Every structure is written in C-alpha cells, then in structure tokens.
Amino acid sequence: MIALTLALGAASAIAQKDSAAREPVVAPLRSKDMKPGYGVVESVTAVQLARSGQPVYRIGVRMPDGSVQFRDLDKPEFKVGDNVLLTNAGDIVPD
C-alpha cells in the first residue's frame, strides 16, 4: 500500500512537471496597454511569464467596444462568462 502511494505521488509530480513544461511562455503585459472598464471574461489560460518563469493565468476580457484586454492573475479566480471590472490599477474585480 505504501509503495502504491509513493508511486502515485511520483506519477503526480511528473505529470505536474510535464504540464508546466507545456504551458505557453508569454511576455509580461505592459501597463500602458491596460485600460479600465467593464467586460466579460472570454478566456482563462495557464501560461508562464518569459522573464520570471512564474506560472500565471492570463485572463482575456471582451470589452463593450469589441476589443479584448488581458490581465495576469496568480489564481484562476474567474471563469468564462463572468462579468468583471478592469480597474485603473490593472486589477480584475467581479461586477
């Protein structure tokens, strides 16, 4: 039983490492591209930041004018279809 538990733990660790290796590597978002406003979450994608290698969730938000803005979050706090507010500070809050 202990051997099975250890084997499952090792398999899980390998799967997590493989999953992290397949996450797209993206450049950090530029604050000058961020504009405040209301929108609807269109996508939630696990990515890795190019400079730091930090895993984050890139949230795509469709704005009323049809444009899409992105924000990076540490946790997947939102799901597709959520109404949100993008703040001046670059945060996402529920609407």
Image: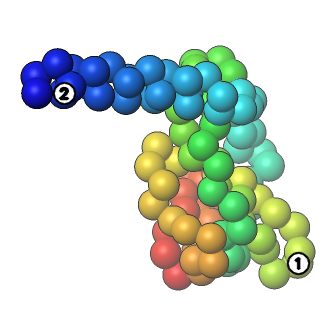
Which residue is at a point 74% across and 39% down the rendered structure image?
30
Q: Counting other residues with Cα less than 10 Å from the Cα at mark 2, is it few (<14), some (14-19), or many (20 or more)?
A: few
Which residue is at a point 52% across and 48% down the rendered structure image?
73
- The correct choice, above or below, for 81 with respect to 26 in the image is below
Q: x%, y% of residue 39?
A: 69, 76
Report the disc number at residue 65: 1
Residue sitting at the far right: 66
Q: x%, y% of residue 29?
A: 71, 39
Relative depth, front residue between 28 and 44: 44
Count up the numbered dots. Answer: 2
- The correct choice, above or below, for 31 with respect to 53 in the image is below
Q: In the picture provided, is 59 more to the left or to the right than 30?
A: left
Relative depth, front residue between 80 and 10: 10
Say which quarter of the image contains residue 85: bottom right
Say which quarter of the image contains residue 83: bottom right
Identify residue for label 2.
5
Which residue is at a point 54% across and 57% down the rendered structure image?
91
Q: x%, y% of residue 92?
A: 54, 63
- The correct choice, above or below, for 35 with respect to 63 in the image is above
Name the N-terminal-most of marks 1 and 2. Answer: 2
Quadrant of the frame with the N terminus: top left
Say which quarter of the image contains residue 22: top right
- Label 1: element kind: loop
Q: Amino acid at mark 2?
A: Thr
